[in-house]
Image (tube, rainbow, N blue to C red):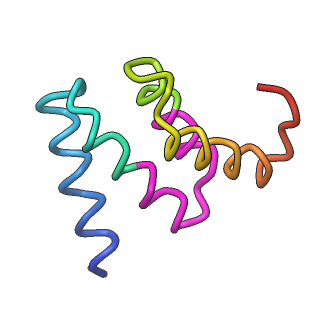
Amino acid sequence: MSDLHTAMAYYNKARSLDPTYIPGVFNCAVLYMRNRQFSEAAECLDLVLDENPDDTAALLNRAIAHIFLKKTEV
């Protein structure tokens, strides 16, 4: 198993234990972005932004995910 897959497995386990732990959700989104899984990344980033609507890193990454998904409206 690659390091990225191992990291994703750990983040998913952490999310199942505490889905409100926002740094874990954000890091999961980063891994999804790196794996070009933009839909999954956008879902995670939406969760981050539900908790902190002014998170500029989450806003930027969600915008990038939407570009790759060809979504022009948020």
Which residues, given as a range, are shown in magenta? 29-45
Q: Please, is residue 67 above or below residue 6 in the view?
A: above
Q: Is residue 73 magenta?
A: no
- Residue sitting at 15 percent across and 28 percent down? 18
* Prevalent SS, magenta region: helix
The residue furthest bottom is 2
Image-based side of 50 in relation to 6, left or right: right
Q: Nearer the viewer, residue 13 or 60?
A: 60
- Residue sitting at 20 percent across and 32 percent down? 21
- Residue sitting at 86 percent across and 46 percent down? 70
- Residue sitting at 28 percent across and 33 percent down? 22
> Residue 15, image x and y in percent?
22, 36
Image-based side of 11 in relation to 69, left or right: left
Q: Nearer the viewer, residue 41 or 52?
A: 52
Q: Nearer the viewer, residue 36 or 59?
A: 59
The residue furthest top is 50
